[in-house]
Image (tube, rainbow, N blue to C red):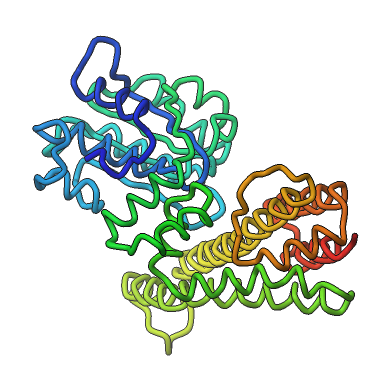
Amino acid sequence: MWADLVGQEKLVATLRRAVAGEPHAMTHAWLFVGPPGSGRSNAAKAFAAALQCPQGGCGKCQTCVTVLNGSHPDVTLVRTEKLSIGVDEVRQLVRGAALAPATGRYQILVIEDADRVTERGADALLKSLEEPSARTVWMLCAPTSEDVVVTIRSRCRRVELVTPREQAISELLQRRDDIDPETAEFAARIAQGHIGRARSLAANADARARRVEMLSIPATLNSLGACLEAAQSLVQAATAEAAAITTELDAAELAQLSETLGISGSKGRPRHAAAALAELEDQQKKRSTRLQRDCLDRVLTELTSYYRDVLMHQTDSGEALINRDFDTDIRHLATNSTPAATLHKLDAILACRQELMSNVTPLLAMESLLIALSLN
């Protein structure tokens, strides 16, 4: 059950003690924190399976399998595709948490994006954490404890994941996904500790091609027009990628809701159905917005690694490059710029990420960033 949690030996030891029922090792609320891609949600799901498993997490029985694939009746896995988790969703979870387990030892709720719970949602969750049912366990996941409302994190036991080593990720890709050693080592280095990103790069030629396109951008930023054109191209690509994911899903959700409401496309929108349809449309827009931002965030992550490599050259740090396949472009940029200018560019990438999180129009944010990156 714990084999895929690479580099997390200390965490696994803590969770094993809780599963074994050692004194003071178990609690009703857990907060899993760690850098992106370190395996927060995987750790929570493995812990949930181990708590429900009669053998303490064998990884092979029906209980373990159903927990991991999300079909166990007493384990609720929550991963929002919207920008936030609102009070209504949290109240529904709290109602479920109060129920007695149907077949398992515990009623377990795993919130993979606890940092997206709104303040009102946190207020709704608070009572369940303060007065938990005897057999209810909450597992919240977030990048850092500071990303979670203080009243919630203060009532959880925090467990921390670390960034896995490149070698550990490479070995995992070879063992679990049957990736050849060369590709696995390349993906592990490029992913910078993000296991999901490493798996995508190793298994998906399109993902590797998109990375090459992203990292080719800095060398082309030689005019204002080039910056604006590149920004537009990035935003259009992110929008198209989000649409590819959501178009069929949106249509299926609309058809299902229309059937539930007893309406057909030819009848328009009856008054009794207008509110439900408007709410669905709003949720779908929020999901599309989040997916677009996730795509742009990957661009920012790649650019950060690129300019990190530039800075390594400029300071003769001796650190190995992440993007060795772009060494020529990186050396050229390092020679024709200064460490101070590179630091300003890294700051601009961070500022762009913050702007996207604060609802600045993506095109404006990316245009501002690429113009900043073009300056020496």
Quarter of the view holding residue 225: bottom right
What residue is rendered at 63% in x and 63% in y?
299
Q: Nearer the viewer, residue 328 or 266?
A: 328
Q: Is residue 98 left or right of residue 348?
A: left
Q: Quadrant of the C terminus?
A: bottom right
Q: Is residue 348 above or below residue 136?
A: below
How many numbered circles are shown? 0
Q: Residue at x 31, y 29 (%)?
A: 12
Position in image of residue 88 (x %, y %): 46, 45
Quadrant, the N terminus: top left
Q: Which one is nearer the viewer's eye here, 160 or 49? A: 160
Q: Position of residue 10 (x, y in %)?
A: 36, 25
Residue at x-position 25% and y-position 20%: 17
Residue 130 vs 91, above or below: the answer is above
Quarter-of-image position of residue 319? top right
* Left or right of residue 64, residue 311 in this image: right
Residue 335 spot, x, y in % from top left: 84, 59
Q: Nearer the viewer, residue 104 or 218?
A: 218
314 on left or right of 174: right
Residue 150 appears at what percent x and percent y? 57, 25
